[in-house]
Image (cartoon, grey):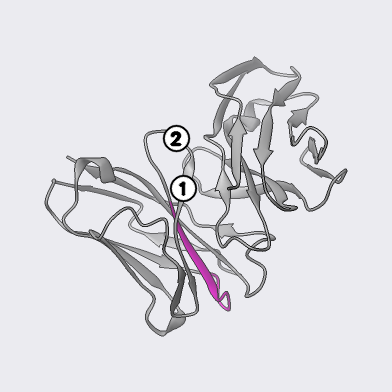
Amino acid sequence: EAGVTQFPSHSVIEKGQTVTLRCDPISGHDNLYWYRRVMGKEIKFLLHFVKESKQDESGMPNNRFLAERTGGTYSTLKVQPAELEDSGVYFCASSPLGQGYNEQFFGPGTRLTVL
Amino acid sequence: GNSVTQMEGPVTLSEEAFLTINCTYTATGYPSLFWYVQYPGEGLQLLLKATKADDKGSNKGFEATYRKETTSFHLEKGSVQVSDSAVYFCALSDHYANDMRFGAGTRLTVKP
């Protein structure tokens, strides 16, 4: 069974540009989460999808961040326009419906560097 | 709200040394507790977990016991190997919150 995949693995962009990160969850997992780790600090929750619906987006830092999950499969996280403080590692995780509290399966992360 | 406080690193040990990474938590309910590990160049992997008080999670020689009285979930290993070099994250989740709360991570380097 394939794990959670994320693309790209690394992205280097300039301030003001747009970047789109993609996450493919484990097949059949209705829960999809985005997290971010900035500057070696704790991994922080950004938002949670259940299928195609946003269940909780309380962790999204501001309206420059837009997440979508069309059709309830893969998800994208767009940052527009990117700022220096957006640099960090963005993790995606998935879990079966009703099991998000039990274990979440993480992808390898996308390292975003904003110059 | 729920939170996790984790021992700051980095930690450098010699091979076969004993490892302890401290983790304490704050939670309003009865959370599940986890240790995740990130090896160089890889994603987060679940190392072990415990879902109720006094449970002991174990995997690959690592152990952690869910201590409700001290709100702790310290990670231990009796004899570390070079291959254990990684970043370790303590985390919790509960049945009510949608998110998993993580500590800051502890970077462990094991030298031969």
- Percent x, y of residue B36: 62, 44
Q: Splitting the image into 4 quarters, where does residue B19 fall?
A: top right
State whether residue A12 appears in this view. yes
- Percent x, y of residue B35: 67, 43
For badge 1, the amino acid type reads Lys
**Image check: A113 left or right of B93?**
left
Q: Are marks 1 and 2 in contact (CB under 8 Å)?
A: yes
Q: Chain of mark 1?
A: A
For badge 2, the amino acid type reads Lys
Q: Secondary structure at mark 2?
A: loop
Q: In this orientation, which residue lies closer to the viewer: A62 or A77?
A: A62
- Percent x, y of residue B70: 79, 32
- In the rendered structure, which segment of residues is drawn in magenta? A26-35
Q: In this orientation, which residue lies closer to the viewer: A25 or B16?
A: A25
Q: Chain of mark 2?
A: A
- Percent x, y of residue B14: 66, 14
Return the residue at label 2. Answer: A41
Residue lying at 37% horizontally and 34% vertically, measured from the top left = A39
Q: Give the quadrant of the C terminus of chain A.
A: top left
**Crowd around label 1: few <14 · some 14–19 · many ≥20 (10 Å):** many
Magenta highlight on residue A99: no
- Depicted A103 relative to depicted B4: above or below: below
Q: Give the quadrant of the N terminus of chain A.
A: bottom right
Q: How many marks?
A: 2
State whether residue B89 appears in this view. no
Image mark for residue A44: 1
- Depicted B63 relative to depicted A51: above or below: above
Q: Splitting the image into 4 quarters, where does residue B26 fall?
A: top right
Q: How far apart are the two marked residues, 1 and 2, measured between alpha carbons? A: 9 Å
Residue lying at 76% horizontally and 29% vertically, measured from the top left = B76
